[in-house]
Image (cartoon, grey):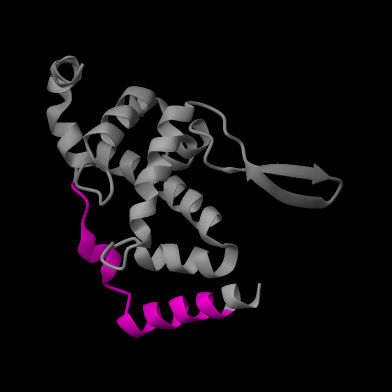
Amino acid sequence: MEKAIEEASEPYAEILNLLESVPGVGKIVSTTFLATVGNPERFPDGRHVASYLGLVPSQYDSGEKERPGKITKEGSSECRSMLVEAAHQASRKSSPLHRLFCRHLVRHGYRKAVVTIASHLARLLYAIWTQEKPFDATRWKADCTPAEKVNKVKRYKLVSSRK
């Protein structure tokens, strides 16, 4: 089975290598994303890709009130679950996406933070694919100081210990 997958993905080797430059994204995740999205030109931007994969919150509108709900879970459940698995890597301190993960962790908890990172990964993979540039970790780490990470993690521990 692995040989068949490698042979089928051989024409897309360059694109897959670019997608695999993102931390947490390996051969299986990149191949699944590539197969699910197909042609990136049919999407105007990364938000539409995240929406296509069901990684955006639903909206409840009643009169003047707008309330966000749970994610829509539309589209490919396989690709969505692969992106969520890849998003778990952001919880590691060595990950360039750790700062973003901590920000959502403090506000919404672990599970919602992972799903939010999965949505960001979908948009990031789309941008890498369309721009044909590898992931640049310095861009994600440049504005993050170690003290800021520690404070956010401590704050999360304080919030979680109250429950």
User: Residue 58 colored magenta?
Assistant: no
At x 53%, y 54%, the residue is 111
Q: Could you say where residue 61 lies in the image, as x and y percent from the top left?
A: 79, 44
Residue 128, by quadrant, is top left
Can residue 11 be seen here? The reply is no
Q: Is residue 40 above or below residue 122?
A: above
Q: Could you say where residue 94 lies in the image, as x and y percent from the top left?
A: 26, 66
- Magenta span: 134-158
Looking at the image, which is closer to me, 70 or 137?
Answer: 70
Work out which quarter of the rendered image holds the N terminus and state it: top left
Work out which quarter of the rendered image holds the C terminus and state it: bottom right
Q: Is residue 143 above or below residue 96?
A: below
At x 39%, y 41%, the residue is 83
At x 17%, y 25%, the residue is 12
Looking at the image, which is closer to me, 67 or 161?
Answer: 161
Q: Could you say where residue 37 lies in the image, as x and y percent from the top left?
A: 37, 26
At x 69%, y 46%, the residue is 69
Looking at the image, which is closer to me, 126 or 6?
Answer: 6
User: Residue 149 colored magenta?
Assistant: yes
Can residue 136 be seen here? The reply is yes
Q: Is residue 112 above or below residue 98?
A: above
Q: Could you say where residue 27 lies in the image, as x and y percent from the top left?
A: 22, 34
Task: Tell me: 113 left or right of 18.
Answer: right
Residue furthest to the right in view is 63
Magenta stretch: helix, strand or loop mostly: helix
